[in-house]
Image (cartoon, rainbow, N blue to C red):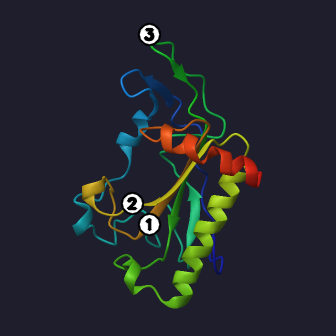
Amino acid sequence: MYGELRGSLGPSAADEGSEIHKRFDVFTEAWVGIAPARNTRPLDSPAESADPEECPFCPGGIEVPFSYDAAVFDNRFPSFRPDPPPPPRLDGRTGPAQGRCEVVLYTDRHDASFGELSPIELARVVAIWIDRGRELWADPAHAYVCVFENRGAEVGATTSVLWMRANSSNTVVGLLPKPARAIQPSRVLRNT
């Protein structure tokens, strides 16, 4: 938690998601995360009309059952896990989906927008971005870290609350291998 601690989180769904893995896409020459359990996430559909009473991220919801200033916790429906299960045996290349998936909640106000955050809340959010990025990059198992905002049904968000994700993995996934290779020398020089 960031700010005053006003409760405790329940157990995570660490044993769920045993089928997560990554597959190598021969057409794009990139690894792709496979996480079928993400299809069972609680939905507030459509995201724009979600009721704060049913929102899993609002105080009293299933994710954070108490009020908070800002919160960071492991995603219960991750694409990557620190200790992933072995990948399935398939015809193509597969690998373990090692990494982290975190949820970052900027505020406990359901209908807030980034532009409505106070200077103190904005400073807290920027501090969280820096903190999460540093911690995830510090893990030598992570070859890739992506901190991004996930808002609106158009980008696949299932809730309308103001939040973001911090993901990391042991390989560069999706269509980013080439740009990631381009920045690798600077990481080596900075020893990060």
Q: CA distance from mark 3 to mark 2?
A: 33 Å
Q: CA distance from mark 3 to mark 1?
A: 38 Å
Whichever of labels 3 and 1 marks the residue nearer the N terminus, that label is: 3
Could you tell me if the residues under marks 1 and 2 are in contact, i.e. CB atoms within 8 Å? yes
Q: On the picture, is 94 further left or further right than 11?
A: left
> Looking at the image, which residue sits at the far top?
91
Q: Which residue is mark 1?
A: 163
Residue 14 or residue 69, whichever sits in front: 69
Quadrant in the picture for residue 123: bottom right
Kind of residue at badge 1? Trp
Image mark count: 3
Whichever of labels 3 and 2 marks the residue nearer the N terminus, that label is: 3
Q: Is residue 144 above or below residue 157?
A: above
> Looking at the image, which residue sits at the far right?
191
Q: Secondary structure at mark 3?
A: loop
Q: Which residue is mark 2?
A: 150
Kind of residue at badge 2? Asn
Residue 88 or residue 30, whichever sits in front: 30
Q: Is residue 139 above or below residue 106?
A: above
Q: Which mark is residue 91?
A: 3
Q: Report the residue at 45% width, 14% height from top.
A: 92
Q: Secondary structure at mark 2?
A: loop
Is residue 192 visible to the viewer in this orientation of the structure?
no
- Mark 1 crowdedness (10 Å alpha carbons): few <14, some 14-19, many ≥20: many
Q: Secondary structure at mark 1?
A: strand
> Looking at the image, which residue sits at the far bottom?
119
Q: On the picture, is 48 further left or further right than 68?
A: left
Q: Report the residue at 37% width, 75% height from top.
A: 110
Residue 16 or residue 90, whichever sits in front: 90
